[in-house]
Amino acid sequence: SKAQRQLKVGYVSINHTDRHTGASRYYSRSPVLNLKGNWLQEAGFDYGQPVIVTVEQGRLIICLAGTE
């Protein structure tokens, strides 16, 4: 498996509704990054395992919980 993967940041639409009427007030976009593939398991990330995401400017560091 390759040591680097090139992915693209996408977005998800979020529907903001009025609490009282339930009517849609507006939609907003939020960035989303989907990680998927056998390479995750090859790197030690298996189903159901908790992870810690450390956020730095321009960088995300993903570690298995308890190993950071």
Image (tube, rainbow, N blue to C red):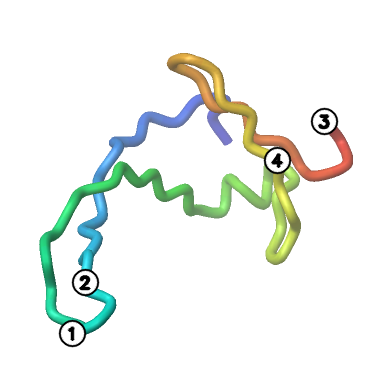
Q: Which mark is residue 67?
A: none
Determine whether the residue tagged by mark 4 lies in a helix, strand or loop.
strand
Residue 2 horizontal/vertical position (percent)? 54, 29
Q: Which residue corresponds to mark 1?
A: 21
The three-letter code of the residue at mark 1 reads Thr
Residue sitting at the far front: 20
Q: Which residue corresponds to mark 3?
A: 68
Gap between marks 3 and 2, in whole Å?
38 Å
Q: Residues within 10 Å of mark 3 (few under 14, many from 20)?
A: few
- Please identify, in this view, whether the residue under mark 2 or under mark 4 is nearer the observer: 2
Gap between marks 2 and 1, in whole Å?
8 Å
Q: Which mark is residue 17?
A: 2
Q: Looking at the figure, which quarter contains the N terminus? A: top right
The three-letter code of the residue at mark 3 reads Glu
Q: Which residue corresponds to mark 4?
A: 52
The three-letter code of the residue at mark 4 reads Ile
Determine whether the residue tagged by mark 1 lies in a helix, strand or loop.
loop
Give the mark, 3 or 1, whose residue is nearer the N terminus.
Answer: 1
Residue 49 horizontal/vertical position (percent)? 75, 58
Gap between marks 2 and 4, in whole Å?
31 Å
